[in-house]
Amino acid sequence: RGIKVMADIPIEEAINTNWDLVVLPGGMPGANHLRDSKVLSEILEKQARDGGKYAAICAAPAVVLAEKGLVGEGATCYPAPHFRAKLVNPTDEAVAVTGQVTTSKGPGTAIKFALELGEQLFGKEVREKIEKEMLVS
């Protein structure tokens, strides 16, 4: 799509950092690239092992998290049958929180996903303030 994103640090340096939350964007073929990144796999496995929070939206819950055994029952993803088939008992909810993992369906649920992640990091009061300011209810 021609969008250029510049990272603050190389991903290889991110392995040795403790993260409050690791979030995977969705979309294809991007989710395949995330899945194939050995460094990202190490970051996700460390996050899971240490009890840290991680999240994914759209194709990423199925293509990345499910294929790596990093998501359990009740997650959600983009509602295409070939993605949902990779999840165990997927939910139809827009956003699903299952333990330390948060998943969401896709572009139309991105605001709900972001608000949920914001609440996890900063609390319900901050979420409600942002919802009010953004006219989300």
Image (cartoon, grey):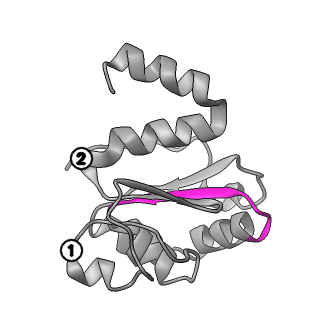
Q: Residue 7, relative to residue 105: is it above or below? A: above
Q: Position of residue 123 (x, y in %)?
A: 64, 30
Left or right placement of residue 21 versus residue 96 in this view: right
Task: Say what amino acid the circle numbered 1 marks.
Answer: Ala
Do labels 2 and 1 touch, CB within 8 Å? no
Q: Which residue is mark 1?
A: 80
Q: Count neighbours of disc 2 (C-alpha within 10 A) and say few if under 14, some if 14 to 19, many if 20 or more.
A: few
Residue drawn at 33 percent across, 68 percent down: 59
Q: Residue at x 24, y 69 (%)?
A: 79
Tell me where residue 92 appears, x and y as whole percent. Answer: 32, 64
Say which of 5 and 85 sits in front.
85
Of 60 and 37, nearer the camera is 60
Residue 66: image location, x then y, percent:
48, 79
Q: Is residue 81 left or right of residue 7?
A: left
Residue 28 bears which disc, if any? none
Measured Cα–Cα span from mark 2 to mark 1: 14 Å
Find out whether residue 69 is within the magenta segment.
no
Kind of residue at disc 2 = Gly
Relative height, residue 38 to residue 120 (above, below):
below
Residue 7, image x, y percentages: 52, 44
Residue 113 sits above or below residue 106 on the image:
above
Q: Could you tell me which secondary element the residue under label 2 belongs to?
A: helix
Residue range corresponding to the magenta coloring: 49-58
Where is mark 2, residue-wise?
Answer: 108
Q: Nearer the viewer, residue 41 or 130?
A: 130
Give the secondary structure at mark 1: loop
